[in-house]
Amino acid sequence: MKFHRAFVLLISIFAVLLFLSCQQASKPASAQTGEASGVIGDSGAIKPLTANLVKLDTKNFKSFALDTKPFHTDAHKAHISDPMKFQPLPDQDLPSGSTAVVGSEVCVFYPNAKIASAAELQSLPAGVPVPFGTILPIKGDKVGNPDNKERYGMFQFQDNWNWFYRTSYKGQEGLTFGADLYGLGDTNEANRISARLYQTGGKYDAFYPVVGYHVLPAPIAARLEGDRLAIQSVRGDEYELRGYRSDLMPDDMIALYAEHSPRYASDSQGWSRKTPIFVTTDLAAHAQHLMFDRTLQFIEEAFFLPRLKTLNEAFLADLKAREPGADSYPESLGKTVLYFQVAQALLDLAPDRVANSDDNYGAAPVVYHDKSEDKVLASYPGEVREEIAKIDRAEGVEPSSVFSFKNGARAEEDYSQYKPRGHYTKNGALSAYFRAMMWFGRIHFLIASAGPAP
């Protein structure tokens, strides 16, 4: 009976605290004294809840009307039975050889032109405009200015510095200026892809057997045409996340994509040795999930964690103010204090999040300074330290050190649930937030440890 009465009193106190907290939050700013909202400190002064918290910059956000219509995922249902047939990628009658793509709207072809110095620029023949996205053959070495060694032999022409290149257009031989060309040195295959993207505004007008700058192997293309799905095996050594900090991007799918660079390969094998090429909407869905996950991580770490700590401090301050009138329920009040102290200790153990003064390129804008667990927990009661030790071990079901009562009753908790997982393993701050929220979410204020006898 005493065990039951203790828990009833505990729940009552918790309900009152929640009520008072809601009442405080619901008051208009004009009805509050001091700051807009606050916590009573040791000196009796009200400290603002917003102190030392990250402020959200909303200057680049715009308001929009919420859509109340049901969300559907069947937008492409009408096209499920459409035939899938890859079309040959247009080669503009240049199936092989060295090429470049016209990447400007002012490209000009100079038929039968020859140039050996800057003085001859004035005698170039009338040029013929070449359409944007045209593939031109590149013949021989670039044509440079031998008098300009400071700029590697480039010509100053049409407000640009570049070389001229020998090419042919509509059956004539001639020159064109390099500043108007893209893909010099790229493969003919890559330039065909670039040309098509230029001509279609970045959106293909048909199914082509390419993904980015990757051409699908014929067996994969045939399987996709027949089955709509193709699965490739991936070697274990391809999952090495080179160039990425594992705590920033422990993501095989995106990391493998990042290593599929079509140009400037730094090793002899290059990007072509990578196996996976994803030809489904899964990549977009996965990228959307990652954006949400990264946003959630930032909000949890920079906003929710400090606010949770402030709220917890407010509960502890209110409980301390109730001690003089708690003669009739000292054990229940003590357990309530210990309950919030465990959460406070878990949050106190979070490392300090400090701006990284050495980060010049944005790879690690913040660093984490770990705290000494012994020093942090030194000011907490023994029951709290024991509870934290069980949470740290995360070994399984054990009797709770906090919820052990004078009548011998002891609550049990599954401490394996406090082992951080998912993105909460990325740093100590997220891990501390995870454990504190798990504590708040799992600990139940039961009226009785068992139901009535049958």
Image: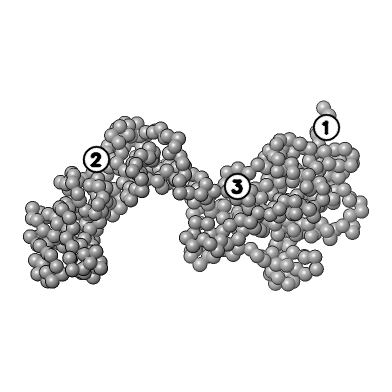
The percent position of residue 94, horizontal first and vertical second, equals 16, 46
Looking at this view, is 132 or 427 the one in front?
427
Q: Residue furthest right?
A: 327
In front: mark 2 or mark 1?
A: 2
Q: Amino acid at mark 2?
A: Gln
Q: Quadrant of the N terminus?
A: top right
In front: mark 3 or mark 2?
A: 3
Q: State left or right for residue 146 relative to residue 334.
A: left
Question: Mark 1 sits on what residue?
Answer: 452
The percent position of residue 135, horizontal first and vertical second, equals 19, 52
Q: State left or right for residue 281 relative to residue 131.
A: right
Mark 1 crowd level (few <14, some 14–19, many ≥20, 10 Å Cα)? few
Disc assigned to residue 87: 2
Nearest to N terminus: mark 2 or mark 1:
2
Residue 95, quarter of picture: top left
Q: Are marks 2 and 1 in contact (CB under 8 Å)?
A: no
Label 3: which secondary element: helix
Q: Are marks 3 and 2 in contact (CB under 8 Å)?
A: no
Residue 150, quarter of picture: bottom left
Mark 3 crowd level (few <14, some 14–19, many ≥20, 10 Å Cα)? some
Q: Is residue 357 above or below residue 370?
A: below
Residue positioned 14% across, 67% down in the render? 117
Real-space Cα distance between discs 3 and 1?
40 Å
Q: Is residue 103 above or below residue 12?
A: below
Q: Is residue 145 above or below residue 72?
A: below
Q: Residue furthest top?
A: 454
Residue positioned 75% across, 68% down in the render? 46
Looking at this view, is 135 or 239 the one in front?
239
Question: Mark 3 sits on what residue?
Answer: 424
